Image (cartoon, grey):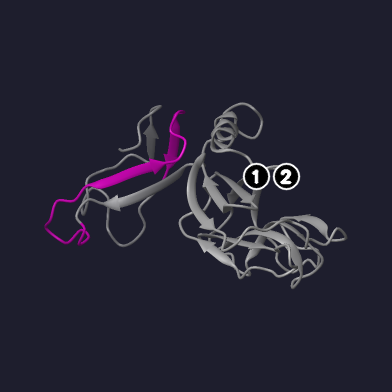
Amino acid sequence: EVWCRPETIRQTGPSRLVEIGNNTSFRNVLLGQQNGQAAIRVLDHMGTETTTVYSDGVFTEDTVVHVVLSVDSDSGMGLYVDGDLHELFVADEPGTFAGWDPEYVLSVANNAAGGRAWLGDLYLVALYDRVLVPEEVRQNYEAGPRGEGPVPSAQQVHFDIENSRGCREGEDCNLVVTRSGDVTEELAVPYRILGSAVEGEDFDPIPREVVFPPEESTQ
């Protein structure tokens, strides 16, 4: 179980969130990031590692996410994202953890060899000795990493011209400013327009700051 905020989705290798292994090539289990995908590898009871399984749409840049990998010897692997089942990987045949090497070490945000660093913020990493049922995954998501509810996502602000073609001479255009993420608090964003256009001649005077009241996301 991991609560994290990736610094960027441009992470490959895959970069390791959690791994039990001894170097880049040998491991019992791996949960990592490959750009926006979750990457999963698990050693089976025969000591044979599964090929890397990828799941799309898990990570978004600078956005907090709750990820749970549940490995069941009978039904396979379930990947949960923000409390909901995101993808189920069905096992070809039942298996156990008998093939796992007890000498392998637990690594967080990298592997044991130090060559697969993950960049971002980690709020919680937890390992369990049994399968979490869907109700428990949902309960953990709603509780958040500190028992205070889910971590709010970082805010992002976008400046766009209302006309999709851009603003051409002689046309009326509006500057639209939007924010995403945690919008519960007021946010003030200072800005300025650069270039050859002259305020008062080429465009109407504009404020030097956009203020978003609480719960509002568009100005």
Quadrant location of the N terminus? top right
Residue 168 in the image: x percent, y percent? Answer: 17, 61
Dominant secondary-structure state across the stretch colored magenta:
loop
Residue 5, magenta (yes or no): no
For residue 47, side relative to residue 15 (left or right) = right
Residue drawn 45% across the image and 33% down it? 187
Instruction: Determine which residue is flagged by label 2.
Output: 127
Q: Nearer the viewer, residue 79 or 219?
A: 79
Instruction: Determine which residue is flagged by label 1.
Output: 1
Looking at the image, residue 63 lies above or below residue 17 = above
Residue 74 in the image: x percent, y percent? Answer: 61, 52
For residue 27, side relative to residue 170 (left or right) = right
Residue 106 in the image: x percent, y percent? Answer: 80, 55
Looking at the image, residue 99 lies above or below residue 180 = below
* Image quadrant in which you'd find residue 32: bottom right
Q: Which residues are magenta?
A: 164-191
Which secondary structure lies at badge 1? loop
Q: Is residue 35 visible?
A: no
Identify the amino acid type marked 2: Leu
Residue drawn 19% across the image and 55% down it? 163
Residue found at the far left of this picture: 170
Residue 200 in the image: x percent, y percent? Answer: 23, 48
Upstream in sequence: badge 1 or badge 2: 1
Disc 1 to disc 2, how far (Cα)? 6 Å
Identify the amino acid type marked 1: Glu
